[in-house]
Amino acid sequence: MSAPKQQVIRQLAEQEFASELKALIKSDKLTRPVNWLMSPQAVVTYIMGGKLKDGTVISPKYFGNQRLIEIAVATLVTDRALLLIGIPGTAKTWVAEHLAAAISGDSSLLVQGTSGMSEESIRYGWNYAKLLAEGPSEGAMVGSPLFHAMKDGKIARIEELTRIPSEVQDNLITLLSEKLMPVAELNQTIQAQQGFNLIATANDRDRGVNELSSALRRRFNTVVMPLPKNLEEEVKIVTARVNTKIGSAEAISSKSGLKEIHRLVTIFRELRSGATEDGLSKLNAPSSTLSTAEAISVVNNGLALATHFGDGTLKVEDLAGGITGAIIKDPVQDKAIWREYLETVVKERKDWKDLYKACKEVI
């Protein structure tokens, strides 16, 4: 028996949307910055979606204000780095990945910021076996993603910039202002090639945040990524993102599936804002962020339940556990807030009796 063909869980943006990128590059007749795959205008089309002259449909990667994306792309044309900031679930990482894919064709030059990061993650490290055998040499160096982005003229990414210790953050100042990386051990300097730039993301509601110094902030142009402006837009985002998953399109295209997503997003928006959608009632907000990303996760989990333990159609029973788990992070405070919401809002809505019953059973 032959071994099953392996499949990656999640493709890189440039792999998943390779046909769209190819079509855009082929049709793009506008001026391209050095080492960019396409023009800034084409990058915006790739992110926001559209239809090309040859009939190719470019799917939207971001639902929101196009001007924000234009500002982000224009920033990357200049010598300033780009900082995408916002609460969890505002598509910061998603947008950063697709910008890198459209501009450089490579979104994998990524540094994940953590509280225990060292300078090597920003600059370079060493293959110690070679270092002991040969001494300091180019062959013994292990370059960071930023190191390779500078050498190749590509876009690098840093996730969770504000989680990186301040002394490690400071390594970025010379890199971004002078566009060079000193290698003292070799008495050399790596100079950035044209096309190099950096996209960083930061969560402005996280704990354990290390504030950026004013010197480092000046090296970035900051774009604040907002939450979806209305209920319909957020429902559209959740549905579109879930439908990219294998086997989910049919379930979410059904009337019942769309109804459940609409109710889920309504709950998240109301608890997040501390008021009902009609503005008539004030609510206590739980400690969780209840972001769009969490809503997508709840729907994906519900679809798994519906597919393997139901009839394949997304129902309220499939979402109840996920909704409760997303809301209750603090077992005392959040549980009381969720119970209150169920009794004062969900129970009183005409067509929400089934949701009330399903959630009460798992709380």
Image (tube, rainbow, N blue to C red):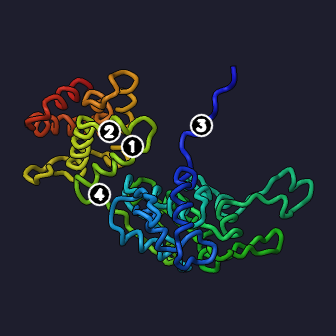
Whole-number angstrom distance, CA of label 1 to CA of label 4: 18 Å
Residue displayed at 11% across by 35% down? 351
Give the quadrant of residue 322.
top left
Q: Is residue 52 visible?
A: yes
Report helix, strand or loop for mark 2: helix
Decide: few, some or many residues near mark 2? Use Cα within 10 Å; few <14, some 14-19, many ≥20. many
Coordinates of residue 172 in the picture (x, y in percent): 60, 70
Coordinates of residue 102 in the picture (x, y in percent): 54, 64
**Residue at which label 1 appears:** 243
Whole-number angstrom distance, CA of label 3 to CA of label 2: 24 Å
Q: Earlier in the sequence, mark 3 or mark 1?
A: 3
Amino acid at the residue labelled 1: Asn
> Between tags 3 and 4, which lies in front?
3
Coordinates of residue 78 in the picture (x, y in percent): 53, 80
Amino acid at the residue labelled 3: Gln
**Residue at which label 3 appears:** 7
Circle count: 4
Q: Earlier in the sequence, mark 1 or mark 4?
A: 4
Considering the image in quadrants, where does the N terminus appear? top right
Q: Earlier in the sequence, mark 1 or mark 2?
A: 1
Dot 1 and dot 2 residues touching (CB under 8 Å): yes
**Residue at which label 4 appears:** 228
Residue displayed at 68% across by 26% down? 3
Dot 4 and dot 2 residues touching (CB under 8 Å): no
Considering the image in quadrants, where does the C terminus appear? top left
Residue displayed at 57% across by 51% down? 15
**Residue at which label 2 appears:** 252
